[in-house]
Image (cartoon, rainbow, N blue to C red):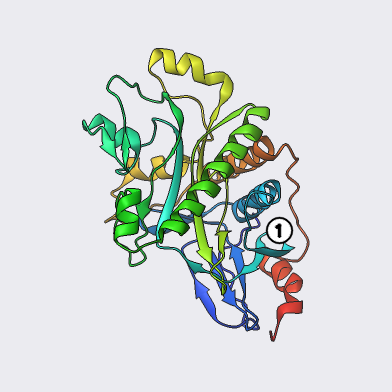
Amino acid sequence: MRVLEEAFIAELPNYYRGKVRENYDLAGGERIIIATDRLSAFDRIITCIPDKGHVLTQTARYWFEATKDICPNHVIAYPDPNVVVGKRLDILPVEIVVRGYLAGTTGTSLLTLYKKGERNMYGLSLPDGLKDNQALPEPVITPTSKAFDGGHDEPLSPKEIIDQNLLTAEQWETLSRYALALFARGQEIATKRGLILVDTKYEFGTDENGTIILADEIHTPDSSRYWMADSYEEAFRTGGRPKSFDKDFVRAWVVERCDPYKDDIPAIPAELIADTSAVYKNAYEMITGQTFVPDNSGDTVLERIRTNLTPYFGK
């Protein structure tokens, strides 16, 4: 199977390797971001999923195009299916999550906190009697601190964000306006595709002029929760979970066989990897309404990328 396990290209400057993306900073203020096929879980890389980097990059591309009238984004060019060249930004220290439903499983999700008995969180006040996966009266922003040093994100209220000088009042107003407008556009388009955009994460940064710009990815199956619209009413009525893009086959398989935080990860079957790849491709097609077409040019994915990035060598 053609996979992109790593993306080191010696001819490009200022290399930085993240968990799943590899970056190069050019002298002119651009950043080359290459999405590999690595799958990160349990604080480590556990395998590679063919075409995952392609799917995520091109799904984000679809949404950046569909929302560029709402707010500026970092995109400059797409020289390869796995690559975006973007404007290098100073990432703001607040992670913006917009939620349209009382859902989620993480420690900072509204549902988790709500089930613990909390009703006032993120500067919001929720009534008693809400059910799992219930639609909120209107989408809300649940910001968290952005733990750059590997620490845990912590819930924040707008007042805390401003009082702690994480953002100015003007920056918070701009981020809030952008985030809610982006989410509304996402929900509108998702509805046309037979999907529900449940919640999503946005990352913003500032350029050399202090302008707030949307970065990273937007409305991908890794940054967002989608449900199949035709499964929602029945699932909500019976207390079940609506159908979603279930990409967690590999994680579940690993957890059943070892303690992934302590033990060696066993060899993951090729069939399981192929099934997960198929889920990503199906997600791309449902979200964008476009057919996924793999790019099999070049002897390997890395060779293809290297060829397509040749114009950036020496910059």
Question: Where is residue 4 drawn, in percent x and y?
Answer: 60, 62
Farthest residue toward the bottom?
314
On the rendered structure, is 17 left or right of 50? left
Q: How many marks?
A: 1
Which amino acid, mark 1? Pro
Res. 72 in view: yes
Q: Residue at x 78, y 61 (%)?
A: 297
On the rendered structure, is 93 left or right of 206? left
Question: Where is residue 18 drawn, in percent x and y?
Answer: 48, 67
Q: Nearer the viewer, residue 48 or 137?
A: 137
Q: Residue at x 44, y 50 (%)?
A: 96
Q: Residue at x 73, y 44 (%)?
A: 292
Question: Where is residue 160 drawn, in percent x and y?
Answer: 29, 54
74 in relation to 315, above or below: above
Among the 4 quarters of the image, the one containing residue 245: top right
Res. 222 in view: no
Farthest residue toward the front?
170
Q: Residue at x 34, y 64 (%)?
A: 165
> Dot 1: few (<14), some (14–19), or many (≥20) neighbours within 10 Å?
many
Q: Nearer the viewer, residue 89 or 300?
A: 89
306 in relation to 229, above or below: below
Question: Where is residue 8 drawn, in percent x and y?
Answer: 58, 75
On the rendered structure, is 243 left or right of 130? right
Q: Nearer the viewer, residue 311 or 163?
A: 163
Quadrant of image for the C terminus: bottom right
222 in relation to 45, above or below: above
Q: Which residue was labeled with disc 1?
A: 81
Among the 4 quarters of the image, the one containing residue 29: bottom right
Quadrant of image for the N terminus: bottom right
**Circle 1: element type:** loop
